[in-house]
Amino acid sequence: MAKDPLAEAGLHFDELNKLRVLEPDVSQKTIELKEECEEFVDKIGQFQKIVGGLIELVDELAKEAENEKMKAIGARNLLKSVEKQREAQQQQLQALIAEKKMQLERYRIEYEALQKVEAEQNEFIDQFILQK
């Protein structure tokens, strides 16, 4: 078979009898590749939307987790503060108890001294009455 001189020059006719530089099967494969690329780009766009939504959701969850963490830290600090206040109050009450015990001991000693003075005065009165 004789080769087509146009084909040898790299020129071909398509199904509409238009002159083309590419062979018909290469042209068809190029169109198919273009369509596949468009589908791929569409799928990538959808994937990016899905991933974007996922990233937003993860960011929102991270913010919520951070807020809960801060609340927990605040609650823990408040609990420590209350605990320290209780310890300080307990120490104050223990100091007050010790002070009151010392005051009680002073009053007891003073009471005993007054009883002794009263007994001496009663004895003096009794002796004074007996001498008369």
Image (spheres, rainbow, N blue to C red):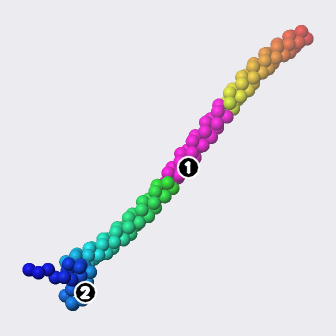
Does residue 19 appear left or right of residue 123 in this picture? left
- The residue pinned by badge 1 equals 74
- The residue pinned by badge 2 equals 19
* Residue sitting at the far left: 1
The residue closer to the viewer here, 80 or 10, is 10
Who's the residue at 51% across and 49% down the image?
Answer: 72
Who's the residue at 42% across and 60% down the image?
Answer: 58
Q: Please state the horizontal and vertical placement of residue 98, each as a whole percent of the image.
A: 68, 27
Does residue 46 appear left or right of residue 82 in this picture? left
Who's the residue at 41% across and 66% down the image?
Answer: 52
Q: Quadrant of residue 26?
A: bottom left
| Residue type, label 2 | Leu
Q: For the residue labelled by badge 1, is the local secondary structure a helix, a strand or a loop?
A: helix
**Up-down: is 117 above or below 41?**
above
Q: Please state the horizontal and vertical placement of residue 50, each as a whole percent of the image.
A: 36, 67
Q: For the residue labelled by badge 2, is the local secondary structure a helix, a strand or a loop?
A: strand
| Residue type, label 1 | Gly
| Magenta stretch encompasses residue 77 | yes
Segment colored magenta: 68-94
Magenta span: helix, strand or loop, mainly? helix
Q: Is residue 122 visible?
A: no
Does residue 55 appear left or right of residue 35 in this picture? right
The residue closer to the viewer here, 27 or 124, is 27
